[in-house]
Amino acid sequence: MTQNFARAALSAALCSSLLMVSALAAAGPIEDGVKLLEAQRYAEATKLFQKEAAKDNPRAMYYLGDMLNQGLGTHRQPLSATVWWEKGAYLGDVDCQLALASAYRAGLGVKLDPRQALIWDRVAAKHGSSEAMRNIGDYFAQGNGQEVDFKEAAKWYWRGANGGFPGAQRALAQLLMTGDGVDKDPAAAYVLMRAASQAQKNYAPDRNAAADARVLRHELSADQLAKAEKLTKESVLESLKALGAGD
């Protein structure tokens, strides 16, 4: 059953490009809906998103799910939220895929199911989501629905970190501090942790990275700190490039 679900999910992801083109063409109404959300005009936003969702616009489905999950303009309806996210996920929307994976991880409106969560995070990762790559690393680092495998975790953390996701950079830094799945390197860990504390691309800073970086700095020896000052995020990730190899 899980294998059939996985094949269906991956097939849907690979066949979604044409559907996403039509969704992009409808970006105007979605932007209007977002403005209504920001103005807290929830009834109007809901009506607009419902109209667009009826046209198979997955972005509208994502926002409808988010509104239902947060209880914006209505009482919280986690189950209804996941219904919309699942529809949008099959239509190729990465945010819907991430939200659906998160719902399965937390048992939000659906039965707690780490394996299904992993399926959807893998689909989102195939679409290039660095956040999904960090999530996949977590499954293996934490043994969530999988056997603990720090090397596999390091692979996915590196991919997410290289994609600019601060959360993945922090996670990889933690492995570099402990030596789990990678060679221990406190100096490189400090550089990545410091990078994770800063906004990158479309991602906000990791909320715990700044405090972690301060702690790490105090733990470094003088030689390690001198080494760290010569490193950059880019040079550290390049030196660890082999971690990201493989399927």
Image (cartoon, grey):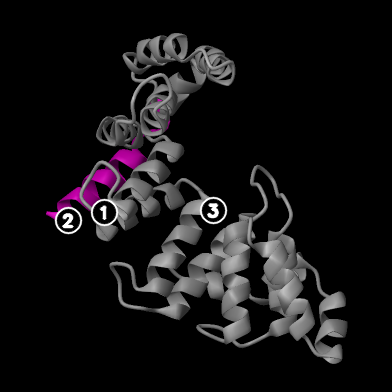
Helix, strand or loop at mark 2: helix
Q: How many marks?
A: 3
Q: CA distance from mark 2 to mark 1?
A: 8 Å
> Outermost residue toward the left?
1
* Location of mark 3 (residue): 130
Magenta stretch holds residue 50? no
Magenta-tinted stretch: 1-19
Residue at the image position 59 percent from the left and 71 percent from the top: 172
Label 2–label 1 contact, CB within 8 A: yes
Q: CA distance from mark 3 to mark 1?
A: 19 Å
Is 121 above or below relative to 211? above
Q: Amino acid at mark 1?
A: Gln
Tell me the quarter of the image containing the N terminus: bottom left
Q: Amino acid at mark 2?
A: Thr
Label 2–label 3 contact, CB within 8 A: no
* Location of mark 1 (residue): 116
Find residue 9 and report its horizontal and vertical position in percent. Answer: 27, 45
Is residue 56 visible to the viewer in this orientation of the structure?
yes
* Location of mark 2 (residue): 2
